Amino acid sequence: RYPDRPPSSLADLGSGDGHLLTTLLPTLFPQGGHGARIFFIDRQPTLPDSALESLRRKNWLPTVVAQDVLAWAASAPPTELIFTNLFLHHFPDSELKNLFQNLSTRTSTFAAAEPFRGFAGSLGARLLRLLGCHPVTQHDARVSVEAGFRPRELSKLWPQPHHWSLTEQRVGLFTHFFSAEKKV
């Protein structure tokens, strides 16, 4: 979708330490950000200053927002691309519906990668013990898979679907991908 330029603004919901975006952006846009704004949204963001400075040197304009995602979405500035990774499965459907309603008025593109709820994920979570993973990791994996999504579950929560191109599918064994792009 962005072969020639980065989005003018983007937001990472539940960004945590920002590792995903600070790793992907230099690869996806080696020419830099061209002044694009980046919002890192998390109740307890832990982005290192060095990561923010590295983004600034590449002409990105990062802003760390220490706020609940639901509250941010209710008053967020217009943002070209909003995405999240392994975050939505923490919310009940009622909160997701509210979140999606707010996001749909503030962005033209939303994308999410979440756990796929199915046999492969359940089996994979149980096999983590054989790899020597810590019991907390084993527990978190099992709970995340159980809270994950199957096709059409997120699409049903997105408002006014006839105004959007919705994509929802399994990717690989463990990932559930959802995107919404506003029709022009």
Image (spheres, grey):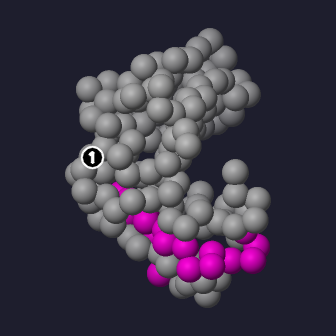
Amino acid marked by disc 1 = Leu
Residue located at (44% from left, 59% from top): 79
The C terminus lies in which quarter of the figure? top right
Residue 145 drawn above or below residue 28 = above
Answer whether residue 130 is visible to the viewer in this image: no
Helix, strand or loop at label 1? It is: helix
Residue 151 drawn above or below residue 96 = above
Residue located at (75% from left, 65% from top): 4
139, 55: nearer the viewer: 55
Q: Position of residue 183 (x, y in %)?
A: 55, 39
Q: In this view, does 92 lie to the left or right of 80?
A: left
Is 160 contained in the magenta span?
no
Residue located at (33% from left, 66% from top): 65
Answer whether residue 64 is visible to the viewer in this image: yes
Residue 24 drawn above or below residue 170 = below
Residue 119 drawn above or below residue 18 = above
How many numbered marks have been drawn onto this rendered protein structure?
1
Q: Where is residue 83 in the image (x, y as percent from the top left)?
A: 51, 49
Q: Residue furthest bottom?
A: 57
Residue located at (75% from left, 77% from top): 31
- Circle 1 residues within 10 Å: few <14, some 14–19, many ≥20: some
128, 94: nearer the viewer: 94
Q: Where is residue 73 in the image (x, y as percent from the top left)?
A: 30, 51
Is 35 contained in the magenta span?
yes
Q: Is residue 88 left or right of residue 71?
A: right
Q: Residue furthest front?
A: 184
Q: What stretch is highlighted in magenta?
A: 29-52
Q: Where is residue 72 in the image (x, y as percent from the top left)?
A: 28, 55
Determine which residue is flagged by label 1.
Answer: 70
